[in-house]
Structures are given as C-alpha cells and as structure tokens.
Amino acid sequence: MLTSQEQTLQYPFFNRPQATNNTIIQIEDGWTAFTPVSEWSRLLTAYADEWRISYLNKDYKVCNSYPSAVIVPRQIEDKIIISSANFRDGGRFPVLCYRHEGGSILLRSSQPMCGTNNKRCKEDERLLNAVLGPGRRGYIIDTRSISQAQSSRAKGGGTEIDAAYPQWRKVHKMVPRPHELADSFFKLIEACNDITCSTSQWISKLDNSGWLSAIQSALNAACVTAQCLHQEVAAVLVHGSAGRDSTLVVTSLAQAILNPDCRTVRGLQALIEREWIQAGHQFFSRTHYGPYHPSNSQSSTHAPTFLLFLDCLYQLHYQFQFSFEYTIELLIELYNHAYFSNYGTFLGDSEAERVKLRLSERTCSLWSYINQPEILEKWLNPLYKPNSGVIWPSVAPISIQLWKELYLGHTSVAPWKSLLSWIKQIKQNYIAVRKIASQLQIQIRKAIDEMRSNSDVYDEENQDEHICIAQLSLESQST
C-alpha cells in the first residue's frame, strides 16, 4: 500500500485542465459543489427542530473515516454521540443519510461492539430511539448473514441485542463481503476474457463467478430497505461490519429507488459524494489494484464494491431506461475514473486523508470536468422522461443482466451506440422544429396585431383569412 507521500506522485497531482481556444472552461468548482451544508440545507430549514449539523468530528478524532460535519438528532448532545461512537466499530455512530417523504429516515453506521459478553451502551440506545416517533418501530438491516453476525461476536463485534433495542427489528440481508466480491470479480473477468470456451462453458463460468448473484443480493437488500421506508414509513438503520462497503451499496441504491433526484446527473454526483466519498469508502485501498494486477489475489484491501454499486445502477437503468437522465456510458466513465483518473475525486480513503493530501488545492475535481456543457451532452439520455415516483426493480435471477458494454467492451456494441446517436439526433431535430414553430407563431401574432392597428376596419369574421394572408407573407419572406 502506498503511503500518503507516495500517493502525491500519482498523475492527478500533475494534471491541469485542458485549454479550449486558449481558455480554461470550468463551470463550477466540483470540490465545493456538494458540501454537507448545501446538501442538507433544505432538510435543515424544513425540519430544524428535528435535525442539526454537528461538527464534533471536525478534527477527525471521534471517527477518522467520517466527515467533519454530520447530521444528527437535535435533541441528542455531542457527548452522547461520542459515547455511541466509542461503542461502534471504528467510531462510526448512526448518522442520517436520507429523509423520505412521509418522515421515514435512513441511517447508517457500523456494527456495535457487543462481543461475547453482550455489552450495552445506553447512549447508543438513546441515540437510536431518538429518531423514532412515539410508539413507532424501526428496522435494522444487517448486510451480513446471521452466522456471520454471530461469528463477529468472537472478535468483539456482533449485532444489536434485542433486549436493548426493543423498538427495532433486525433483518439480515446478506451482501457479499469485500474479499468475496474480489474473488467473484476476478472469476468474472477471467470468463469474459476466455474467447475459446463454448457457450455452455461460458454460461457455467459466468454462473460460477457469483457476480450476478452478488448483484441480486445487493438489489434485494436495497429493495427491502426501500420498502420499509416507503410502504411502512419506518426508520431504517443499515450496517454490516465496518460500515464502509456493503452498507454504502444498500443505502445509496435505496435512495436511487426512492428519490428521483438521484436519477439525474447532478443527483448521482451528489449521491456518490454523500454516500461514498464523504461517508468514508476506501476508494484508494479498494481500487488501487485491478483484477489484472498480479498481487491482487494477495491483496486484502482490494474489492470492487463501488463497481457493484454501479452495476446495480445499470440494472435499474436497464429496467427503467426512461427514468434516468444519464446513459450507461456515464456509469462506465465513473468506473474508469475510480480505477485510473486524471482527477483527485476518488483518491484517498477518507475525508481526513483527502484533507491531509490537500486534494482540493492540488488536484482537479472530476465533477468540474463532467459538468461542462459540451462534456455533459454526450452522457445525457435522449429517452429521459422525469419520473417522480418510486421505481421497484425486479430482482428475479432472470432479470439480472450482464453489463456487456463494460465487461465485454472488446466485442462490438456499435449498433446500440449508433441507435442512441440516431435517437439523440431525432430529439435535437424535434426541439429545433418546435423552436422554429414557436418563433413563427410569434411572428404571426405580430402580423395580426399590425393589421388590426393599421386597418380602419378589422372584420372579426374574416380573422382566419387575415391569418392565412399573414402566414403567406411570412412564407414569402422566409424564401
């Protein structure tokens, strides 16, 4: 693993924005586009009596993987939160990550350190109960199996004790752990690169990789989380072990299912910034080595967790193509930048590391590049039709698709790209024609007004005739 000093020798520290016509175009600073204050301003304004921004972690001493600012219940003091952090793995105490319509809330954290002695923390119990209304119940979505959660007790971890959290119901929805994902991804890439095997052998290799099953498990956990929030209007806490991998997959996918803003380009950027970058996903450790690296099999930190999230988004996009503002090419672009990028957005394992590396000063943000109009244009979905509703994906095995454009990029996918370009051209022509029609209507109205003002007698009964005359006049002028 590279040290902080060695990380500064990577290309993003030497990259500078390219000039266009001797002018550097940058619409906005991507480093400041999605700060906690700006992202949560609407909620804090509407529900100021329920939530507040806490800066208890401004020095990253309470939790070195959390950002300096977090959203916590207003009635809970910082000292209670600190006690809760001491009880949670890595100090990752429960924080708010989404408030759904109707008042249901989504929280995330790491596992409680109950151990074999079933330790309790009254401050942690008080913090969780504070987010529940009178007589309300909540759900704890554990992304581990029951056996995995129980085995964690021997290492000092575990899961919430039923007697200590009587208002919370535990639901285990297993999502593959990082090392399992890494092994699965390695097998998937091997299968995709094998061009000599028969169709039956290819299908067998794909099935044995377990990658599509991992996607199904992640989507299933996200759908259960979304159902608890939307249909039961209940509070939901999601955690696995450390809360920096599968937890983030589930919370971010649940928001993509429920929140239409997360299906727009800026909404996707905000979601990644909020639920992955600021939430402490170990981007550098997880993506420093790809599946082709010889030391990958010995690496205990590499895991394609972020790719799993992108692949799940692809599944949503495949099933609801009209509901996403962006195309799958943007998802592929994000995957490429996660592993190798000209920009510093995906460097570091936490906000604390990024501050130490001074990324916002020494590197450019990927969002600044993507949000340039001429760049953004190629990733806009011409079939997009805003959908304010919830999208419920099918998680049946037959519904899970292999992402051919990414994993089989060496094969021909030109027909789809050509079709997409054709659709974009049709839409552009349609917009242009509508614009011309609108301009002509304005000119017709002006011509009629002039005829009314210049004529001593304006016959209302012959209005249609006047309009025809005006139209013919405009046509002759245009020719």
Image: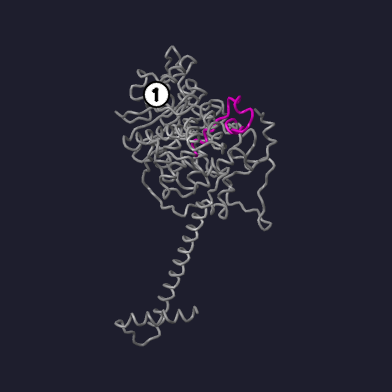
Q: Residue 190 vs residue 166: left or right?
A: right
* Vertical position of residue 254 compared to residue 81: above or below: below
Q: In which quarter of the view is residue 220 placed? A: top left
Where residue 135 sits: x, y (%)?
29, 28
Front position in the image: 321 or 7: 321
Check residue 303 for magenta coloring.
Answer: yes
The residue sitting at 65% across, 49% down in the picture is 17
Residue 223 percent across, percent down from the top left: 38, 35
Q: Name the residue under label 1.
A: 126
Q: Which of the colour schemes (rainbow, by chain, secondary structure, one colour) is used?
A: one colour
In the image shown, does 373 or 194 lie closer to the viewer?
194
From the viewer's perspective, tell me whether residue 13 is left or right of residue 106: right
> Which residue is drawn at the image coordinates 59% and 41% (left, top)?
337
Closer to us: 293 or 103:
293
Q: How crowded is mark 1: few (under 14 residues within 10 Å), some or many (20 or more)?
A: some
Task: Residue at the far top: name it.
Answer: 117
Work out whether 441 lies above or below 469. above
Give the answer, above or below, for where 458 lies relative to 121.
below
Residue 330 seen: yes
Query: On the picture, is 230 further left or further right than 61?
Result: left
Task: Give residue 365's position: percent from left, percent from top.
Answer: 60, 43
The verdict on residue 460 being magenta is no
Q: How many labels does the image show?
A: 1
The N terminus appears in which quarter of the rendering?
top right
Q: Assign a secondary structure to mark 1.
A: helix
At x 45% / y 44%, what residue is drawn?
262
Asked whether residue 280 is in view, the answer is no
Tell me where the magenta segment starts and ends, as one range.
Answer: 285-310
Q: Which amino acid does label 1 sit on?
A: Arg
Residue 298 placement: quadrant: top right
Residue 441: % across, % down:
41, 72
